[in-house]
Image: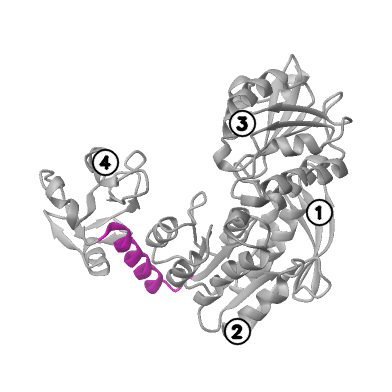
Amino acid sequence: MTWLWTTDEMISAMVGRPIGTLPEGVTGISIDSRSISEGEAFFAIKGDRVDGHNYASIAMANGASLLVISEAKLPALGRLTVPMIVVDDVLAALGRLGAAARARTPAKIVAVTGSVGKTTTKEMLRHVLEPSGKVHAAVASFNNHWGVPLTLARMPADTAFGVFEIGMNHPDEIRPLVKLVRPDVAIITTIAAAHLGNFRDLREIAAAKAEIFEGVEPGGAVVLNRDNEQYDFLEKTAQNCGIEHIYSFGQHAKADFRLADFDGSAEGSIVWATLGGETTEILIGAPGRHIAENAMAALGTAMLVGADLAEAVAALEDLKAVKGRGQRHRRAIGHDSFFTLIDESYNANPASMRAALALLASAQPEGEGRRVAILGDMLEMGEFAAQVHAELASPLLASGIEHVWLSGPEMAHLRDALPSSIHVEYRAATEDMVKFAAASVMPGDVLMIKSSLGIGFGKIVAALLDKYPAFSDTERQS
């Protein structure tokens, strides 16, 4: 049996106290009693809404081999005759285990942050590094105060490349996490108006993202977006943190990893990239200029961590968009027709909205089909909310999209800013938009769904996928 951790290692790293007869080791770590696998350790983390200690017995019933619980909860759980490691604080203990995981591995570690494109770039790095060695990367968007230490603690000792996403909503959130991760390479994808309600301006957002520099290993590198207006500030901040190896990506003529040319289609892109002084033609399986731009960061980073560049380039050809971040579905409607659904429902801010609208503009409807932008509120915009929603009118008009379905109180500002030439449907509540969208889609349409996660536009995606079956070309031929 190959253990992720022996229990002796866990006790030592977490400064824990064993209770009962512990197994020799665990095969994994989980904080979710519903999805835990047999042989894993269950960490009973207390969150804002849920206390994992209340689900300890369910975790054991579902196959957990031991529990990690806090000393304060032991009296309530002492009746359970199961193996336990008792610690002062479960989340803090998980952080200590994560630090031990980082200390024991020779892997090259990459950390990714940015206002837009963190998860997509993280998944792209996973994809391009896999041909060169064993990759460990976060599932979903595990990028916060529990997601980062959990991902670290799950990292096997024989990992070749570790890829971590680090997010933030406020200042001082990245700092403690990056000091756990200690990356060899840190990437900032871009600085944009995300979480703008928690900051005075983009410079403050850039300063918060720049906290990632403080954890970079001695001799390590950073990779910055040369096209972003905050580049000079970030470069200077990195220098002030003692980082000597500063690289850039983007379309800028001086970018180290440069997108020299771009030819996009609805299904993917052909790009010409200048990497290491040589220009290479690259096929990318996922569409969008923003994907191509972040691919430059991924390929440049692959070079910096010693991966095989030729294999990394080849891997991009079968890259697929991530769920909620540009994933496409063709669904049957009518006898031999279909519509296309572009799922961008995971999150939204002004920059990612513009990228998604450009993606929709490049899509080609079938026959009499329409391009339809289904847009919901962008959250955490604070006092800027009305302005940034109304300002989406400009990229919408520039994209040539004529059908816009809007939902949410802030999207009323966009509705009011659009001219009468645009066919606008507005529903205040997401539930009403779910019903409208499911009933109003037509053959040949391309629908793009985009909102902040808290708006619940995933329900629109789910309703469309549930009502309309998958389409294949064999149906049209039959």
Q: Element under label 2?
A: helix
Asked if disc 3 and disc 4 are in contact, CB closer than 8 Å, the reply is no
Disc number lying in front (2 or 4):
2
Q: Is residue 340 magenta?
A: no
Q: Main secondary structure of the magenta part?
A: helix
Residue position for label 3: 461
Q: Is residue 396 left or right of residue 81?
A: right
Determine if residue 286 is in view. no
Q: Is residue 95 magenta?
A: yes
Mark 1 is on which residue type? Ile
- Please tell me whether residue 194 is drawn above or below residue 334 in the rendered image: below
The x, y position of residue 193, in whole percent, is 67, 56
Q: CA distance from mark 3 to mark 2?
A: 45 Å
The x, y position of residue 105, in whole percent, is 41, 71
The x, y position of residue 448, in whole percent, is 72, 36
Pick the front one: 433 or 429? 429
Q: Element under label 4?
A: helix
- Please tell me whether residue 23 is drawn above or below residue 242 in the rendered image: above
Mark 3 and mark 2 lie on one chain; the one further toward the N terminus is: 2
Q: CA distance from mark 3 to mark 4?
A: 31 Å
Q: CA distance from mark 2 to mark 4?
A: 46 Å
Residue position for label 1: 270
- Which residues fall within the magenta stretch? 89-107
Q: CA distance from mark 2 to mark 1?
A: 38 Å
Q: Element under label 3?
A: helix
Q: Is residue 168 left or right of residue 472?
A: left
Residue position for label 2: 240
Please name the residue shown 43% across and 55% down the image: 147
Residue position for label 4: 55
Q: Residues within 10 Å of mark 1 (few under 14, many from 20)?
A: some
Mark 4 is on which residue type? Tyr
